[in-house]
Amino acid sequence: MPPPTLPPESRHFSLSDFDYALPPELIAQFPLPERSASRLLDGRGDAPVDRSFRDLPSLLAPGDLLVFNDTRVLNARLRAAKASGGAVEILVERLLSPTLALTQLRASHAPKPGTRLTIVGRAGSPVPAEVTGRDDRFFVVQLLDGNANFETLMREAGELPLPPYMQRAAGEGDTERYQTVYAKNEGAVAAPTAGLHFDEATLAACRERDIAMTHVTLHVGAGTFLPVKSENIAEHRMHRERYVLSQQTVDAINACRARNGRVVAVGTTSVRTLEGAVRACGELRAHEGETDIFITPGYQFQVVDLLLTNFHLPKSTLLMLVSAFSGYEHIRALYAHAIAQRYRFFSYGDAMLLARSSL
């Protein structure tokens, strides 16, 4: 008799296990005219169900708790030039001080530490800077003008940093649509995209059903778009993101548990905040810090019961996270269904609702 087959979550996963073929035309380049007009793939059961995002309130129960990420996207893309005249694009990952930033740099040749840059400031005014170091795929950039700081530079001369797969510059409409309607705390360089589907009407419909709501803050970094390069995913070095989990939100989650409600994370960033805080503290309690939690199949979730999320890039850490949440084979089947049914993918694409696997 052959040995029993182990469940998928018990085997060793490699990077190639999280690859899939996506027709390029399914990558949403622009948002729909209305936020809540997106489709919703209901993946809570064994078989996928095609729904509208406006159905979401009816899929939740009174007493459930929606956990939103209220981060606000910065105008984090800056233009600069080397002394040679070569163009450099700076994407601020996070601020280390008012004049020091961890960044991604795009140039014909990667700048070495010591390279001088001239950043384009307000009305084209030059701001001198220097690449002072490198941390893996990130570069540390120091402003050399004592009167300048990155927050002012981004506010006055920065551009909204749309994801690289959109293959276009941000337009006037993106200023509003690449932010959630509840965005409040500035600090992200990418939107928590599952929340982009919510409009005031959908939020009102949730309230009418006595669905509770609370917020966390996780400042999404540009590292969310960096590919995993090692076939052995255990070797991947996860990027760090800053988060705040308030006592008010902890109390809301405890109250939800007490009434037998379900904790519904809106987006993987809410998942990373809640699960990262538990990992840091040993239990769910108010905490502020940074998380580099890397969730892969086999992870035991401590807080989240349902997950509302968009579709994620092949070979990405977020695809690994949702595979851990709902089961590897189940996610593979849902993605195959979504492609066959011509769902729209990624940041401006459609959404799906997932239940935590019992495995």
Image (tube, rainbow, N blue to C red):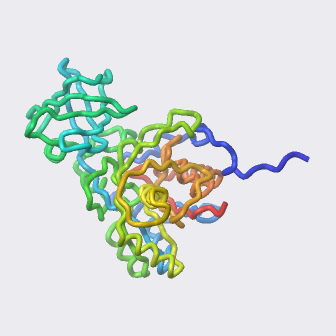
What percent of the width, then of the height, locates residue 350? 45, 56
Q: Left or right: where does residue 54 sit relative to residue 96?
A: right
Question: Where residue 289 sits in the image (x, y, percent)?
Answer: 36, 54
Q: 180 or 226, which is in the foreground? A: 226
In the displayed structure, 78 sits above or below 64; it is above
Where residue 356 appears, x then y in whole percent? 58, 63
Dividing the image into 4 quarters, which one contains the C terminus? Answer: bottom right
Residue drawn 91% across the image and 47% down it:
1
- Residue drawn where x is 62% and y is 52% of the image: 298
Residue 42 falls left or right of residue 206: right
248 versus 163 height, above or below? below
Quarter of the view holding residue 180:
bottom left
Name the spot of residue 89 as percent of width and height, x first. Answer: 26, 32
From the viewer's side, name the closer residue of 130 and 73.
130
Q: Is residue 267 visible?
A: no
Q: Is residue 140 above or below residue 53?
A: above
In this view, which residue lies farthest toward the top? 84
Residue at the image position 46 percent from the left and 59 percent from the top:
271
